[in-house]
Image (cartoon, grey):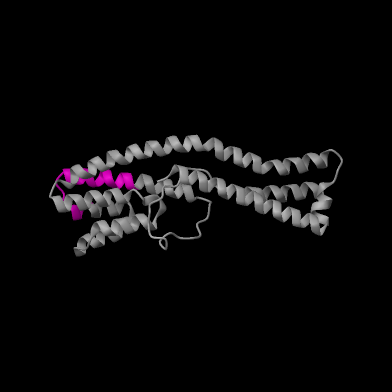
Amino acid sequence: MSGWLAALLLGAAVAICVPSGGSPTARARPPATTWPRTVPFVGRRREVAADQAAVLEVCDLLAADLAAGRPPDAALTAAGERWPPLVPAVEAARLGADVPDVLRRLSWERRGAADLQWVAGAWQVAHHSGHGLAAALERTGDGLRARRRTRRLVDSELASARATARLVACLPLAVLVMGSGAGSDPWAFLLGTPVGWLCLVCGLGLIGLGLWWIERLADGAAGP
């Protein structure tokens, strides 16, 4: 019974080390001090995917409102009501501040909002050149949709690598359970001796490190 209990505990520890699935992380290129250093794995990719979809929706909403004749400030206010993180840009527009600069800062602060850099670039180019902002944002939205299709394709290709890594991470647990069923008692060594505890801690640490490294490689291949 104690062996099965230990197996369950080890399985729970491995499950904690496995990051949650979802869309790949899209990263901007902010200053080194901008990114938060501690981001939990649970829900991280889901939040990133939600921000990416929101940025595309904001771009389409701005383009539609501007094409309908609304002024940029009013269009940006409507977009801020749809996506609350955009409120600092709305305030910047009301005060006559640099809206593209605020959008870029927001793209650095939120991992899933990296595509706001393209919106900021379109806004800045249209402001300096005098060309229509609606047309620029419409082209930006088309580009963001193409990038989103590429992200989905890359994510589907990386799914097998992530699944293989998690399967390999569970193999030690399977071997221990099989050893217990075959009449041996590996849990007595792991949980009953100092050397066993050291092996257990080192093994769990290496499993967690390996899974973290796989996720880093996958995120690097997937974004921005």
Question: Farthest residue toward the left?
Answer: 130
- Quadrant position of residue 56: top left
What percent of the width, then of the height, locates residue 65? 20, 46
- Residue at left 69%, top 47%? 11
Magenta-drawn stretch contains 127: no
In the current view of this chain or complex, which residue is farthest to the right? 183
Residue drawn at 52 percent across, 48 percent down = 216
Location of residue 80 in the rendering, given as x and y in whole percent from the top left corner: 29, 54
Q: Is residue 124 visible?
A: yes
**Nearer to us in this view, 82 or 95:** 95
Q: Name the spot of residue 163 as percent of width and height, x first.
A: 58, 38
Q: Nearer the viewer, residue 95 or 203?
A: 203
Magenta segment boundaries in residue numbering: 55-75
Report the number of discs. Answer: 0
Residue 52 at x, y percent in the picture: 38, 46
**Is 56 contained in the magenta span?**
yes
For residue 184, above or below residue 9: above
The dominant secondary structure in magenta is: helix
Q: Is residue 17 visible?
A: no
Residue located 82% across and 39% down the image: 181
- Give the side of residue 17 with respect to residue 77, left or right: right
